[in-house]
Image (tube, grey):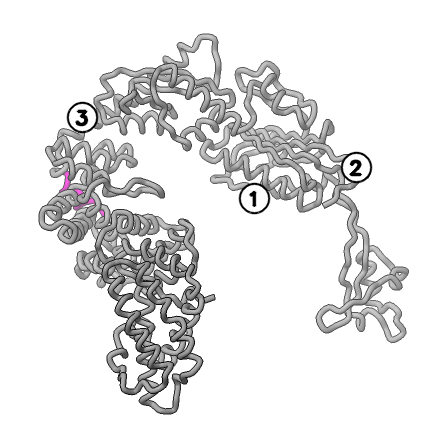
Amino acid sequence: MTLNTSMTAKNLFVELLVEELPPKSLKRLGNSFAELLADGLKAQDLIAKDSVITTFASPRRLAVHITHVALQAADKSVSQKLMPVRVGLDSDGKATPPLLKKLASLGADASVVSTLKQAKDGKADVLFMDSIVKGTELVDGLQKALDETINKLPIPKVMTYQLADGWQSVNFVRPAHGLVALHGTEIISVNVLGLIAGRETQGHRFEASVNPIQLKDADSYVQQLMSEGAVIAGFDARRDEIQQQLTVAAKKENLTLIDDDALLDEVTALVEHPNVLVGTFESEFLGVPQECLILTMKANQKYFPLLDAQGKLSNKFLLVSNIRPADTRFVVGGNERVVRSRLADAKFFYDQDRKKTLDSRLPGLDKVVYHNKLGTQGERIQRVCTIAKAIGLQLGGETLASDAFEAARLAKADLLTEMVGEFPELQGVMGHYYALHDGCSESIAHAIEDHYKPRFSGDALPRNQVGICVALADKLETLTGMFGIKQIPTGDKDPFALRRHALGVIRMLIEKELPLSLDVLLQQAKEAFDNKLTKSSETTDTVDVPSPMHFIYDRLAGSLREQGYEVQEIEAVLSYFPKKLLEIPRRLEAVRTFSELTEAASLAAANKRVHNILEKGMKGKTSFDRNLIGTEQLDIALLKEPAEVTLYETLSDVKSKADAAFESGHYNESLQALAALKNPVDMFFDNVMVFTDDDTLRTNRLCLLQLMHQTMNRIADLSKLAT
């Protein structure tokens, strides 16, 4: 794009001054405001290719600075399609009334007829008119871009408020009070949300040395807002300042700051001129589990807890003030009084909860509805206990099964405690503390906390086998139940977190290398529901619902793509739905190694050809059926052609080696053994007709190909590697 050289490009600055914006949305709103406005100007050719876009966002403002913005876009030539030649021109080549009318609508007349061009458009000859379109002026382009930006901003919840005239109402995230639009030193006369652009903005509510601030030009914003308004305009600059102050303050106290990017972002969105201070609370509160205290301080007060050298919570915390008084005692004291009250509540909940055992709370779960089609939490616990016990028997026998059953029985009891009622994020965590208080073993207490894991991407897995059993059981019960009543994820909506549950099952089976078959696990989960799912489905509308198994494999495929595996490799390994997921990484490694062989491409192509021949010869039987039938019918005596004899002899030797390597888990060796088949396979297809007129020979050759297909595809469907 070339800017209008008759006009010097200058920098543009736009700011929308508003009341305090939602802190959790500020960063996204700021980025969107800048990107949408820049995109709107770019679409009108007002921004140069090398323009730099800088975003500003504070609790009370959204702003953007853009370099090299033209006062007017360059004029450009356009070719306007008019109408078919046969409609626009008569037999003498003169303009017809329809053409003259069309030209008039475009501001032209008959004088331009001789300049019209004719060109093919599909099968017809069409008239085109070349013209010069005047470039958009910045005032018009910015107005259009602003209007579009306001309409497209990702506002979580819109407010309706009256303008100053008391008559008109507008919708925006928060009431807007000021608009700045400067091109160099000049004001661009645009308006939005009832505001007319100027050069006046506001600084800090309490600490600005000048208010209002008269911006000199588009480039003075950051400096003036800081020096005159006591505001750090940029979100990232303010975040860096807070992080630096936090680090210095923690180091001065010889304590460690807890990293929390989400909290840091939220606090950055709450202050304009950050000032980090140190607060303290009474040591007696440290008797409460530190997870409770940390969550109380972070969630309710936006404080930053500090840990000692042993990783234990200290009785000091950091707060980020939005003012910088000479005497900070009143600010610190006020915050300490507030946090003391919050911590006292947490201590009260903790003390009250320990007066009742987890076991005594279980009857209460029979009164808590889990889902109207799946019963109460009490019924759900019984199902999870059954599944966890079955998994425990497979992984470790009676002892593990017994511990898994007990942990599953108590896993949801803390849902009825005061602490979890106040802080749902602590479910499981509080169950762990209360279980230890009740005299449960450490392994069961850990399992109660860990059965929710992994809670998010990258989260740790349960730390012991008991926790693995209960976590698997909990997630399998949820997946089976929700799919059984057709409550499946749609689009971005996943209210029961089924995608997360599926990935949790996948991670545990693979990363913990559990020798469990997915189909067996899902069958055990289904049996735990007795007939509840059947009865529920009878009252549900007919919906095409995938099975939990297919859903899990679909999640697995997506996870493997994110890990960097090629689509062909993933499809090859997952085509036959290997039931033991712990084998999948080794199968993928074997397929990748096989792909590097010089014979790989030829064998993959041959495999695909065999697949297609068998599909035709077996009259549509699935690949699963083909793995079970056909090869026992192979009659060696009917192998007459030298090429088919050679293929059989080589195949027999290869099969022996490949099968032995497969059974011992050496998947690389198993696939590499297939390389010896390349030449015999090529010779077979060059010299042998499979679909001969002789029914007996045709069937026998299909059986030979079936034997080869089975031998080559035990680890993966190699036909998926064919290009």
| 363 within the magenta span | yes
Q: Is residue 604 above or below residue 272?
A: below
Q: Tell me if residue 622 is in the magenta stretch.
A: no
Q: Earlier in the sequence, mark 2 or mark 3?
A: 2
Q: Which residue is mark 1?
A: 152
Q: Is residue 653 left or right of residue 604?
A: left
x and y, in percent, of residue 445 in the image: 17, 37
Residue 351: numbered disc: 3
Question: Looking at the image, which residue is at 21% across and 52% down?
Answer: 375
Q: What is the total number of numbered labels drawn onto the structure image?
A: 3
| Circle 2 residue | 7
Q: Position of residue 705 (x, y in %)?
A: 34, 77
Would residue 653 appear left or right of 87 to someone viewing this image? left
Which label lies toward us, 1 or 2?
Answer: 2
> Residue 570: x percent and y percent?
39, 58
Q: What label sits on residue 8 in the rendered view?
A: none
The answer to which image quadrant residue 260 occupies is top left
- In this rendering, does residue 163 appear at all? no
Depth order, front residue of 344/459? 459
Q: Looking at the image, is 430 positioned above or below residue 540? A: above
- The residue shown at (44%, 80%) is 686
The percent coordinates of residue 405 (x first, y second) are: 13, 47
Q: Which residues are magenta?
A: 361-370
Q: Work out how far the residue at label 2 is from the one at label 3, CA to CA, in angstroms.
A: 74 Å
